[in-house]
Image (cartoon, coloured by chain):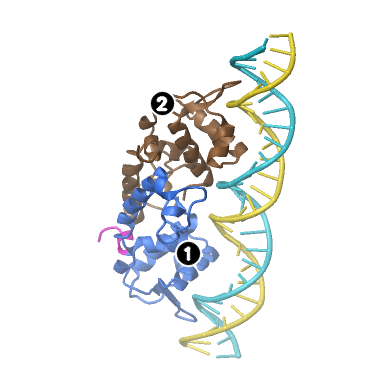
Chain colours: A blue, B brown, C cyan, D yellow
Amino acid sequence: MLSKKSQYAFKALAYLTERYNQGPVLISEISIKKRVPLKFLENILLELKKADILESKKGKGGGYYLKKDPAQVKVATIVRIVNGPIAMLPCVSLNFYRRCENCDEAACGLHDIMIQVRDATLNVLETKTLRDLLPMA
Amino acid sequence: MLSKKSQYAFKALAYLTERYNQGPVLISEISIKKRVPLKFLENILLELKKADILESKKGKGGGYYLKKDPAQVKVATIVRIVNGPIAMLPCVSLNFYRRCENCDEAACGLHDIMIQVRDATLNVLETKTLRDLLPMA
DNA sequence: TTTAAGTCCATAGAGTTGGTGGGGTGTTAG
DNA sequence: CTAACACCCCACCAACTCTATGGACTTAAA
């Protein structure tokens, strides 16, 4: 399951997608409109900035905004940043690979199953973008 | 990601699938062969028994064994028992549904995306069975 | 130089995960 | 009938993660 943090991140990103190309948006505005705890949201947005998804401006008239066209930002990318691995096992993760202990990958049936799950999942998450977070216009 | 408990459960179930129809298997044997902490494994097997996956016999000659043909037991069922929801959001879970707070499902783009992920995942996990845990014979 | 707004750091409570210890209960062999 | 056996059940624990919150600091605009 996605963490609360991830769900907050997507709410915020949906809001920023609506406001794309309309200048910086205040953390406090997002917090109120999307009902996300202010300080928690602060941490999340900062993390997304460090991951090159968002840009920010300090001082009066400042705030956060999307760095790229929302239609170019994959949902999979966001999940990896705020929620971690997408795969169900470390040994089948593309971006967070770690081998299993006491388990021969070549002879592990679970390994094969989880590769299929991973591919099926990525097939969705790599094709959906922030644009898809908004209801149809 | 699957919990360690879930990974242990699958290791144990793979072992019991190998020994299907060969009588009860000792917890201690599984623990040693699959390198799973004994007491932890005890809890896991008990839970699988209560969920109707395993059967047990006490006393000398006792142990655990699969209640049904391994080819009839879906991987999805096991995941739900030992790991909980398969969906990435409570509001798209078939077996553990809970509605989102402050979120209109009909107008939530993330909701739709996560339904697709869920369906893609289930498409694999509902067709794979314990039999698939073993390498090809 | 005041005010607005993001940045950074530290902490902390709650819940979950992973694991252990010990006694209880039912079964079988002799 | 009783000893050995093996699962059953309960309680507990340390470590970690998740979900925050508080306060001081930095940068930018008016």
Task: Write down the chain letter for disc 2.
Answer: B
Decide: few, some or many residues near mark 2? Use Cα within 10 Å; few <14, some 14-19, many ≥20: some
Q: Toward which corner of the image does residue B36 lie, by quadrant? A: top right
Comparing A87 with A99, the one in front is A99
As drawn, A40 above or below A106 = below
Q: Quadrant of the C terminus of chain A?
A: bottom left
Q: Residue furthest left?
A: A137
State the residue position of label 1: A31
Callout 1 touching callout 2 (CB < 8 Å): no
Is residue A136 covered in magenta?
Answer: yes
The circle on residue B68 is 2
Q: Position of residue B46 (x, y in %)?
A: 55, 31
Question: Relative to residue B47, is residue A18 drawn left or right?
Answer: left
Q: Position of residue A67 (x, y in %)?
A: 37, 74
The circle on residue A129 is none
Q: Position of residue A79 (x, y in %)?
A: 41, 60
Residue at image position (39%, 31%) is B70
Residue at image position (35%, 40%) is B136
Question: Relative to residue C2, is residue B94 drawn left or right?
Answer: left
Residue type of the residue flagged with mark 1: Ser
Residue numbers of the magenta segment:
A131-137
Is residue A60 covered in magenta?
Answer: no
Question: Relative to residue C10, is residue B133 drawn left or right?
Answer: left
Task: Write down the chain letter for disc 1.
Answer: A
Disc 2 is placed on an element classified as loop
